Image (cartoon, rainbow, N blue to C red):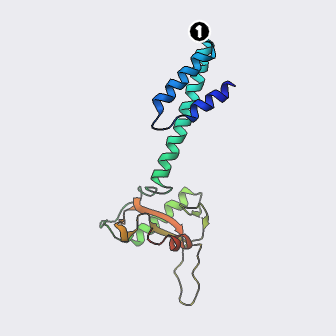
Amino acid sequence: MAIDAGIMAADQITLGSVSSSIDMVNSIATDVNGGNGSATGAEFGKAITDAAIGVLTERVGSAFKALKGTSAGKYSNVPNPKNVKEGGNFTRAQKRNILNENKQQNGGVFKSDKSGKTLDTPTQSKKGQKANMNQAEVDHIKPKSKGGSNSSSNAQVLSKEENLRKGNR
């Protein structure tokens, strides 16, 4: 029952209602022991507070990830070219470095920053041959057509199929 009360209190926590949730936790802790303030009540209050903080931390982390996107800034440690600008193309060296970083972050294999799917090594397309729709490609998170730059922090690795489906979104 105490765990259920802690979970209920923790579930009340949202970014906009932290103070009311803390009041709720204190109220539950006081009510458990008839308001006598015993050590058991204090321990219970601490347990609920710890649970609430854990849930809040998890939810804030999830919200941050949702705002940040799965890959925004993932390659910001990769050196930028001298000519970073809106609507710019990634350089050949920059693409190579981003792909190498993706491979390093994923245990030696290419993985899509969108789906997590294992990708094939990119190859030069050849006239008359179908393109490998599962090959890794470096893509702009914010499209060039919408002012996205060729900064490495605006890069993501997708499969050719994911990139084509995304278009300029």
Vertical placement of 126 versus 150: above or below?
A: below
- 117 and 147: which is toward the camera: 147
Vertical placement of 44 versus 110: above or below?
A: above
Q: Is residue 45 left or right of residue 91?
A: right
Q: Is residue 146 left or right of residue 96?
A: left
Vertical placement of 150 versus 28: above or below?
A: below
| Residue sitting at x 40%, y 58% | 153
User: Residue 6: horizontal and vertical position, in percent?
Assistant: 62, 28
Which of the 4 quarters of the picture holds residue 162? Answer: bottom right
- 162 and 9: which is toward the camera: 9
Quadrant for the C terminus in the image: bottom left
| Residue sitting at x 62%, y 64% | 118
Which of the 4 quarters of the picture holds residue 152? Answer: bottom left
- 147 and 116: which is toward the camera: 147
Which of the 4 quarters of the picture holds residue 32? Answer: top right
User: Residue 145: horizontal and vertical position, in percent?
Assistant: 37, 71
Tell me the SS state at disc 1.
loop
Residue that carries the numbered disc 1 in the rendered image: 36
